[in-house]
Image: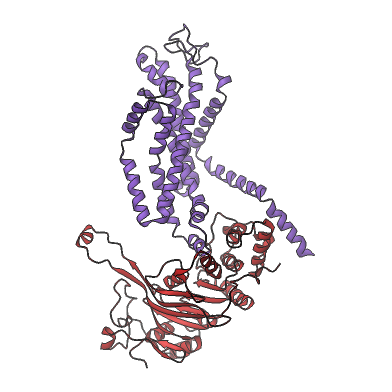
Amino acid sequence: MEMQTSRQVLHKKMEMGFSVRLHKFFVSAVDFWRRYKKTKTAVFGLVIILIFAFIAINASWLAPYDPYLITRERFAPPSAKHWLGTDDMGRDILSRIIYGSRVSLSIGFIIAALSMTIGIVIGAVSGYFGGKVDTLLQRLVEMVQMLPSLVLIIVVLLLLGGGIDRIVIIMGLLGWTGTARVVRAEFLSHREREYVEAGKALGFSKFHIIFSEILPAVIPTVLVIMAMNISGAILMEAGLSFLGLGDLSVITWGQMLQNAQRWLSQAWWISFFPGLAIFLTVLSFNLIGDGINDAINPYLKER
Amino acid sequence: MPYLSLEGVAHMSEANGTIMKAENVVKLFPVKKSSLLAALTRKPPDYVHAVDGVSLDVQVGDTIAIVGESGSGKTTLARVMLNLIEPTSGKVIWRGKDVSTLDKNELFQFRKDVQIIFQNPGGALNPRKSIFRILSEPLKLHFNIKSGSELVDRASEALLAVGLNPAIHLDRHPHEFSGGQRQRICIARALSLGAKIIFADEPVSSLDVSIQAQILILMKKLKEEFGLTYIFVTHDLALTRSFASRVYVMYLGEIVESGPVEDIFMEPLHPYTKLLLASTPVPNPKRARSRETIIPVGEIPSPINPPPGCRFHTRCALAKAICKTAKPVVKTVGNRSFACHLVN
């Protein structure tokens, strides 16, 4: 009788699989946050990014003016009416920065997601299988790394025209090499561990061992690179726009900087505020990356 | 519901007799050349002779011990027999079939039937998974079970069989257990698949002595309950003596002597076996003083270029000229075998 009840309790417990897992996730998230918040700069970075994300999502009602609206108030310095001033066509800079955050942030995330996916798969396969597969994939990594990416992107954009989608795809296809290297190194160390050997003896498929046994252990490291990749992508897009290769149909911070070049000596605010936005975002993502790194390797920090 | 007693490979045609066999297994590992010069001169690569021509016979219900020093190739032999690495030459026969020629279905049967427990039970369990996941994933794979409650039942039964409490332990993670409990979980995982042949690679050497005894008693009990066959890989002679039924002594990738455990321990024939037995401490000081002492000469030689002739001659006190040149043939007397020029 007692046995029967404990069995029922057990079944109930396991059937609540989802809520149990959610609870465990919550517990580990709290634990992670406890270590993450020890790095004050990382908390600062996270706050900044959350603010920018909030701004980007709510751009349409946060922006005081229509960002495309051309007015007669050209070169108005920062004032109560236009907090960050206006540009050469009398457009409100604050509104343009608010709308620009949408494109700049999402570009960063999409490029990072694309390149991380490629990098994880190639790195995992390369590190797990080793031998000839590894040699071959590592030569591929070197070939991609060897390409002068800026020149290549410029050539492609000049040939195909500069659309935002093309920038994303090209940068995604070129930016995965660092991730691949790090993931490979992690897999090299994990594949010799006993739990992987045990998995093989249990008859698990290679796919299961790579993605279910080993990959979860690699994810924290991947998050660090992801933060760095996002900031790299934002900076790269800004650079391309600054060179005049951006997409003219959308507002991005790089685009605003490019436009501001000519008025650098007359109206400092046209270039200063978009530059500040880029600077803060990139800095914040790097700080977040450092914070994750310190949170997953607490011993490194104490030394 | 008693799942455990029902499982196991169905075609148990050999109720007794040979269940697994190694025939002349050789495993060489090439040594990586790092220098450019070596690559240019095209010198043939060096090999580590990890296992060099080993034959081994496992009977149903046996408890085999493969003993030897570190670096004697005993773990490599186990990995070859588990089909985790391919032998350079030679064959592993499992229930009459060569394991290198198994088709996909047979390989699944092999994986269910032949399991391993490791020296470091903490390392053998994925630290990120709960015990339920650790136990249920292999079950899902091998028995294609979809129902969650059947998985819970099967996992619970396996945990009960090794003396753990499923109601408490099922949703914990490996780091929440002691070493002995982790080893029990590893054993439970092997049992839940219905394994009949269990390789144990130094199963207790990372545990406290008191826990060692618990685990060994458990393994003995499970052996009787489920008709298991054990293959121990160990350097622990006391464990071998109390647990094994048949002993294989390995030295530098070769088996130098084999036979029933009482014979080997009462009357070792090969000088290396004598050396091994003489180097185990004896708890009785009077007996320790009176017993013959053999002082080993030097370390185990490198397996990269193993010595010619008898591999043990560099350390053997009795070595003659012939030992340095000719390889001793394996002589079989009754149910014992040995490879030494000086013993007949």
Give B279 or B141, whichever is nearer the viewer: B141
**Can you say whether B306 is above or below B287 in the image?**
above
The red chain is B
Q: Image point 46% across, 68% down: which residue? A: B83
Q: Is residue A42 visible?
A: yes
Residue A16 position within the rendered picture, expressed as x and y whole percent measured from the top left = 69, 50
The correct choice, above or below, for B137 with respect to A55 in the image is below
- Viewer-proximal residue, B92 or B307? B92
| Rendered location of residue B8, percent (x, y) | 60, 71
Query: B195 or A276: which is nearer to us?
Result: B195
Taking the image as shown, residue B328 lies to the left or right of residue A78, namely left
Check the picture and name the quadrant holding the N terminus of chain A: bottom right
For residue A60, side relative to residue B167 (left or right): left
Above or below, B185 relative to A13 = below
In depth, the one of A193 and B22 nearer the eye is B22
- Which colour style is shown? by chain
Q: On screen, A170 above or below B42?
A: above
Q: Residue at x 45, y 80 (%)?
A: B56
Image spot of residue B150 (x, y percent) = 68, 60
Horizontal side, residue A97 vs residue B14: left or right: left
Task: Tell me the colour chain A is drawn in.
Answer: purple
